[in-house]
Image: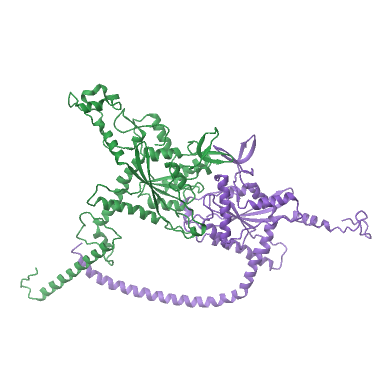
Chain colours: A purple, B green
Amino acid sequence: MSKQQPTQFINPETPGYVGFANLPNQVHRKSVKKGFEFTLMVVGESGLGKSTLINSLFLTDLYPERIIPGAAEKIERTVQIEASTVEIEERGVKLRLTVVDTPGYGDAINCRDCFKTIISYIDEQFERYLHDESGLNRRHIVDNRVHCCFYFISPFGHGLKPLDVAFMKAIHNKVNIVPVIAKADTLTLKERERLKKRILDEIEEHNIKIYHLPDAESDEDEDFKEQTRLLKASIPFSVVGSNQLIEAKGKKVRGRLYPWGVVEVENPEHNDFLKLRTMLITHMQDLQEVTQDLHYENFRSERLKRGGRKVENEDMNKDQILLEKEAELRRMQEMIARMQAQMQLQMQGGEGDGTVHGHHV
Amino acid sequence: MMGKGTQMVRTPGVPGLHFPASLGQLSISASYIARPLICCTQLPAQLEEVGRDSRYSSSYGAMDKEYVGFAALPNQLHRKSIKKGFDFTLMVAGESGLGKSTLINSLFLTNLYEDRQLPEASARLTQTLTIERRGVEIEEGGIKVKLTLVDTPGFGDSVDCSDCWLPVVRFIEEQFEQYLRDESGLNRKNIQDSRVHCCLYFISPFGRGLRPLDVAFLRAVHEKVNIIPVIGKADALMPRETQALKQKIRDQLKEEEINIYQFPDCDSDEDEDFKRQDAEMKESIPFAVVGSCEVVRDIDSRPVRGRCYSWGTVEVENPHHCDFLNLRRMLVQTHLQDLKEVTHDLLYEGYRARCLQSLARPGARDRASRSKLSRRSTTEIPLPMLPMLPLAETEKLIREKDEELRRMQEMLEKMQAQVQQSQAPGEQSDAL
């Protein structure tokens, strides 16, 4: 905006031009200064290539020193939450990326309690944001809410496993789910199409709400519209991850070297890695918005509804709990006394029997 | 059986004697004396004929006079077994989607899973483990094999897989029980051997080794069945990863003290080639396999069984691509009979010993559980060797009644003794 003559507010070159077409630029500059933050959660059984994929997506090494536990340790372990943050910069734009990993998911023999930890983590982040939002100093709220969850599906199953269905149903109202078919280099083209279709059918059958890409605006250019259409058609994305550089057709590419050929990670004919990355980058903003407008608001309204009554109930419950516990104690004491008496009787009687049986033994 | 030519396999004990591979399934336990005895100077006509048989004449031409002829015994056994036919029961276990049915079809070149319907997701949510048996008769080169396949659909599928291996263990033990009963019965001519001779356990190539469920299952069955661990869908792994995974699994098996089937060592008089082959095969356990029933074209446009990707074609029968050939050779061509023998001599005998032991020491059980009513009588060990069937309700009732009767008798005797004591001590009592 030119303001060379304070009395003249009109630029003679462009009459009728106020200048707020420049606003997006201001937003842009401010956001570049401020930087972006994004929290991505990855969930899936171990061995499905989650960490390799994350490293491939962001071209970083978020998992430098990993100790993978043996089977015996895995039996005892419960699901844990590990959040690692990294600041990436590209062309002056800073991104503060937090990746939340869930090691131990799906490992145990009994996976019923697998996702309780994960759900409570998500709720905790919402809780914290709510608390910050209601506080005094709202300038520097750190947004640690989970904006997107990549759910890794094994390419082997014939569709979704019962654990997959149960987990997705438990979190589809709290976070944006993006289903991903992992290690897709074990699937031929036909098998891939079949599996994708089957997964989509099952998602619909169980009423699971996954993240839907927004349609391209009508004023976007054709290329963008076409890209969005392609992306939508390829969900769930079947990906292959790799951090190794292989020599193929004279150039170095990231891929996996098999005796029968080379799988290139960034080859759209081999897998949907590029599509996944495009989707994530193009729609990062949208993912954050949906988290804010839909999931967070859901959480907030639930919380506020409960909020008033919750405190009173807690106090009352405490007294009740005390009384109940005392009653329990008394009952247990009585039971123990009775059992002791019985045992004594038995021992006396038993000894009598013993002498008789002694002849036979 | 399926090889492109006959493979020579030696039988133990008789140097210089070769049998074609299909006959090699006979492992004859009698040891033959290599030196024939001096018995008679003139051979009876038939023996002479046998002696002149091309298979035997090689080393014995010079020793015709001292030839008795029992080097022909294997031949007789061979003929008998061809007539009788072979039967084999194979169990496959592992999570769904690891390629079990495809591998079985590839191994035996049959279509055992023709009318297969994969259950819908909602059905799978509530599915429990079931045991399915399928049988097929295969014939090749005049030799009939009755193959029974035991499948375990639903294994490892549900959210809570605790104790999902119990039906499998029960099934295996039921087969042993059935055989024990048949063996102890009167008519033992035609015992149907439905015992499980081998269990192919499929491990996921993704799991970074054995998962807790794998360990739990293997621990539950390793003393009851021959286990051959197999890595399914191995085309997900690069060669380096395959080696690392195999090593990891081997280490874990040793750590958890799980006894898998040990392929027997070959004899020291085998030739170097065979020994090397044998060592290679043993090194590649667990076998990393790829199965396929489709015929595709390889690089030279020859039709092979394999999987076609946009970056290349995996050939099932290419030893550089996977261990399918090794598995087939070891399982079918060379060690089928050995698996049956180990099942019979080792695992079944172990089961039988455990069964008999628990019958023979009921006194120990009495002392241990006074408060419980002992089901077994302490004085009788059942004859003739009728095994104790824990699930047989009527037998339990009979024994309980026996126990009751005995106790009542004791009480009676006690009362009688008391009565006598209260009578004049000097009187003689008829009861005594």
Residue under the point 63% across and 39% down: A253
The quadrant of the picture occupied by the N terminus of chain A is bottom right
Please, is residue B349 above or below residue B123 in the view? above
Closer to us: A282 or B119: B119
Q: Residue furthest left?
A: B427
| x and y, in percent, of residue A272 in the image | 62, 47
* Residue A301 visible in the picture: yes
| x and y, in percent, of residue B192 in the image | 30, 48
Closer to us: A52 or A283: A283
Residue B138 as seen in the image, left or right of residue A202: left
| x and y, in percent, of residue B318 in the image | 49, 36
| x and y, in percent, of residue A295 in the image | 64, 63
Residue B176 as seen in the image, left or right of residue A361: right
Residue under the point 28% across and 67% down: B371
Please, is residue A89 above or below residue B422 in the view? above
Residue under the point 25% across and 21% down: B62
Residue A15 as seen in the image, left or right of residue A48: right
Res B386 quadrant in image: bottom left
* Residue B262 visible in the picture: no
Res A252 quadrant in image: top right
Res B414 quadrant in image: bottom left
Please, is residue A98 above or below residue A296 in the view? above
